[in-house]
Amino acid sequence: MSDGEDVKKGIVSAVSGAADVGSALVEAVATVASSTLKSAGTVGEQAVLVPTELVKSSLEAATEVGVAGEMASQHVVSGLVSAVTKSTVDAEKGIANVVKTTVESAASGGASVGKVAVGAVRGAIEGTRKVEGDAAGATKAAITGALEGAKTISTEAVDTVASAITDSIEGAGDVVKSVLGR
């Protein structure tokens, strides 16, 4: 069994039967991410590079327990960002990486890239607030990560993500403009 399958099974097991699946998913992902980052020796500055497999497995687990799309990305990113923010000296780089990887992973799975990006940005803000981090910095980093993830997909994805975030996240328009230079 691969590490990704173990992560997925662990999250599904932790969430199964929970009354509040969303909160249980956030906590399970945060616990698994903290453990994975520690065991991989990526605590500190290296924690900015959350393994892609961890993101993908967490999103797959969310889908398996009945949480998909925007809500899946929001809960998964919230848990990952809580773990990364506590584990790294450069939380903003870690947040940008988590959101970028989430957008890329979701797009490869056929999900709506705009909805997933919005959920990921909201999750980053939520996860940062849980650990009393810098919400404004997290918001900028998350928007940047979402747009960077979209750039790896297509020009159309960038436009979709930029529009979705601008329409859904208060004050995001200025950040989108500064990142895209338009």
Image (cartoon, rainbow, N blue to C red):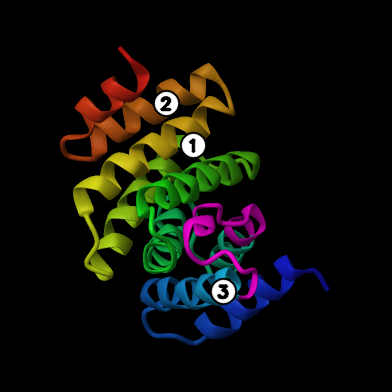
Q: Position of residue 49 (x, y in %)?
A: 55, 52
Q: Secondary structure at mark 2?
A: helix
Q: Read off the residue under disc 3.
A: 38
> Which of the 4 quarters of the picture holds residue 18?
bottom left
Q: Is residue 131 magenta?
A: no
State the extent of the magenta-drawn residues as a range.
39-56
Q: Position of residue 30 (x, y in %)?
A: 45, 72
x 56%, y 74%: residue = 38
Q: Earlier in the sequence, mark 2 or mark 3?
A: 3
Q: CA distance from mark 2 to mark 3?
A: 35 Å
Q: Given the image, on which type of amino acid does mark 1 rest?
A: Val
x 56%, y 77%: residue = 35
> Which label is found at residue 1?
none
Q: Read off the residue under disc 1.
A: 113
Q: Label 3: few (<14), some or many (≥20) within 10 Å?
A: some
Q: Read off the residue under disc 2.
A: 160
| Vertical comparison of 151 with 30: above or below | above
Among all residues in the image, which is located at the extreme left?
Answer: 171
Q: Secondary structure at mark 3?
A: helix
Q: Given the image, on which type of amino acid does mark 2 rest?
A: Thr
Q: Position of residue 15 (x, y in %)?
A: 51, 81
x 29%, y 61%: residue = 128
> Which of the 4 quarters of the picture holds residue 133?
bottom left
Residue contact at pointers 1 and 2, CB within 8 angstroms? yes
